[in-house]
Image (tube, rainbow, N blue to C red):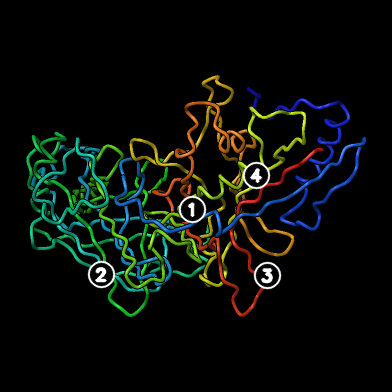
């Protein structure tokens, strides 16, 4: 058996091969720069094979189905009608933690000196914590949970908290994301914006009147007030927006229920005269990391041009996070058959011409015409995944040299500008994997395992990044020959 990436050649052949590989690596999809020359009495022929829609198939898939928000560090509300990537809507349900007790009492209605003023749901966020139109008006509605969320439940985006709620809302309000604040203020370092939604006094008074046995015990408090479900919907003709609301201590933001009370103080001056002063004290019940919570999130593609046929090559590949689409890349049997003819099997006689792979690159070109706002949420990098036996998307790896040492199939994936002015995401495939893929020698490296890859956003549950890419067989628009299909380019060397 031939060890991967090792070719037994005469010294002059090996030197020639090394030099020509450097040339092959330096070429950027330019077949004109690939050619043949004589070196040390050997014919060194460098070639490039660019495969696209004929043998590499790209389709769109919404294979996420539901999103697991267990590891989230934020909440979301809003409605956003996006004609390019699909419309999304979001809301959240959460319980509250007990928080810190007041300085001088463990009961809000401690004595006649304490007076109830009101209750608010307070939400905080910072610049660029959204997607969509910041001037869109939305109505936010707060429901009270009638049943507690299960702390042991593995909640996903398809869970609807509304059946757990009392039918009547306990608070409503309207808001715009920027809410009239100037851009210069939003761009100020550490600026925090606040939304305060008034909550029915019946709820606030229930907490104000609760005795110390409830107000000092976490479980008793959560049984009394089981939490809220918060939704938002757009109420104007704008496209809407979705807001992301961090809640962890690291974010330095506070999402909390505030029961506002007033304490009367009797002051006596030096002459013995008494006067009355009031302190306004908010008792805060935070949403923190320990609180049980879930996000209700839906993504609808009805009014988009996204092609989900799943069989034929698409002209555009849509890649987005937050439960959106991924590209599905299929390396066809025709591609494998083609390369079985080009690349000799390790078992073949090495006395004849030697064919060696110098580089393998999978490139995806940005479609700047499909999304006029493509710069707004452009991902810095993309990832390639395979679907494992457990139904999870994982980075592909392969066994190297029967050593049970798995190495990544791909490196790279960052977006970059090309010399011709295009923007593309490029993945470099391990040449050792490519040879093993064409002629499998190790039992764990079956071809079927690697013929389908999924192109996605890194950490898709944590960002709004999105991009439209050219498919594998795009049609030229208005005979524009500068448009490039996404493709798989193999540079290889034949030494005779």
Q: Is residue 368 above or below residue 358?
A: below
State the image coordinates of residue 462 (x, y, percent, origin top left). Answer: 41, 49
For residue 306, side relative to residue 213 (left or right): right
User: Is residue 420 rendered to the left or right of residue 456?
Assistant: right
Secondary element under disc 4, as helix, strand or loop, is: strand
Q: Which comes sooner in the sequence, label 4 or label 2?
A: 2
Q: Which label sits on residue 343?
A: none
Instruction: Give the residue at mark 4.
Output: 360
N-term-proximal mark, 1 vs 2: 2
Residue at figure coordinates x 50%, y 50% from the top left: 332
**Could you give the CA–CA distance between mark 2 and mark 3, rounded to whole angstroms?**
46 Å
Q: Are marks 4 and 1 in contact (CB under 8 Å)?
A: no
The mark nearer the N terminus, 2 or 3, is 2
| Of labels 1 and 2, the one closer to you | 2
**Dot 1 surroundings within 10 Å: few (below 14), some, or many (20 or more)?**
few
Q: Mark 2 points at which residue?
A: 139
Q: Which of marks 3 and 1 is nearer the N terminus?
A: 1
Q: Quick one: 261 or 268, which is closer to the camera? A: 261
Q: Which of marks 4 and 1 is nearer the N terminus?
A: 1
Mark 1 secondary-structure assignment:
loop
Q: Nearer the viewer, residue 424 or 89?
A: 424
Mark 3 neighbour density, 10 Å: few (under 14) some (14–19) many (20 or more): few
- On the image, the x and y values in percent for residue 244 come to 37, 56
Asked whether residue 465 is in view, the answer is: yes
Q: Tell me how far mark 1 sits from mark 2, CA to CA.
A: 27 Å
Query: Which x, y percent locates residue 232?
Result: 26, 65
Q: Mark 1 points at which residue?
A: 190
- Residue named by callout 3: 482
């Amino acid at each position: 058996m031939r060890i991967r990436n090792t070719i037994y050649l005469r010294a002059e052949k090996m030197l020639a091969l090394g030099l020509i590989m450097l040339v092959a690596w330096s070429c950027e999809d330019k077949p004109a720069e690939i050619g043949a020359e004589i070196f040390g009495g050997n014919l060194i022929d460098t070639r490039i094979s660019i495969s696209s829609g004929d043998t590499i198939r790209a389709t769109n898939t919404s294979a996420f189905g539901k999103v697991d928000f267990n590891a989230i560090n934020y909440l979301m509300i809003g409605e956003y009608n996006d004609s390019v990537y699909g419309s999304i809507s979001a809301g959240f349900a959460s319980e509250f933690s007990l928080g810190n007790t007041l300085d001088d009492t463990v009961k809000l209605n401690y004595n006649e000196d304490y007076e109830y003023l009101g209750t608010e749901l307070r939400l905080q966020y910072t610049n660029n914590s959204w997607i969509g139109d910041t001037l869109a008006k939305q109505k936010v509605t707060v429901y009270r949970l009638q049943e507690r969320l299960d702390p042991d439940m593995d909640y996903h985006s398809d869970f609807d908290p509304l059946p757990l709620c009392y039918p009547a809302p306990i608070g409503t309000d309207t808001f715009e994301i920027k809410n009239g604040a100037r851009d210069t203020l939003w761009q100020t370092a550490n600026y925090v914006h606040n939304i305060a939604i008034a909550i029915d006094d019946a709820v606030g008074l229930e907490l104000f009147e609760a005795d110390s046995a409830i107000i000092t015990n976490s479980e008793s408090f959560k049984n009394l007030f089981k939490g809220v479900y918060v939704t938002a919907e757009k109420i104007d003709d704008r496209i809407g927006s979705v807001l992301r609301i961090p809640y962890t201590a690291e974010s330095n933001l506070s999402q909390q229920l505030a029961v506002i009370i007033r304490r009367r103080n009797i002051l006596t001056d030096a002459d013995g005269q008494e006067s009355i002063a009031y302190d306004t004290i908010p008792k805060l019940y935070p949403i923190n990391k320990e609180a049980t919570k879930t996000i209700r999130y839906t993504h609808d593609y009805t009014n988009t041009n996204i092609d989900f046929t799943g069989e034929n090559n698409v002209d555009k590949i849509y890649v987005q996070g937050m439960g959106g689409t991924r590209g599905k890349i299929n390396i066809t049997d025709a591609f494998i058959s083609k390369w079985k003819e080009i690349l000799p099997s390790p078992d073949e006689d090495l006395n004849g011409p030697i064919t060696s792979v110098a580089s393998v690159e999978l490139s995806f070109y940005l479609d700047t015409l499909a999304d006029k706002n493509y710069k707004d949420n452009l991902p810095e990098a993309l990832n390639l995944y395979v679907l494992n036996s457990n139904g999870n998307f994982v980075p592909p790896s392969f066994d190297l040299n029967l050593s049970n040492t798995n190495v990544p199939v791909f490196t790279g994936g960052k977006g970059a500008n090309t010399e011709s002015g295009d923007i593309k995401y490029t993945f470099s495939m391990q040449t050792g994997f490519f040879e093993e893929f064409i002629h499998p020698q190790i039992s764990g490296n079956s071809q079927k395992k690697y013929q389908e890859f999924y192109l996605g956003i890194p950490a898709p549950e944590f960002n709004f990044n999105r991009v439209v890419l050219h498919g594998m067989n795009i049609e030229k628009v208005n005979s524009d020959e500068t448009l490039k299909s996404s493709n798989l380019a193999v540079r290889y060397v034949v030494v005779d």
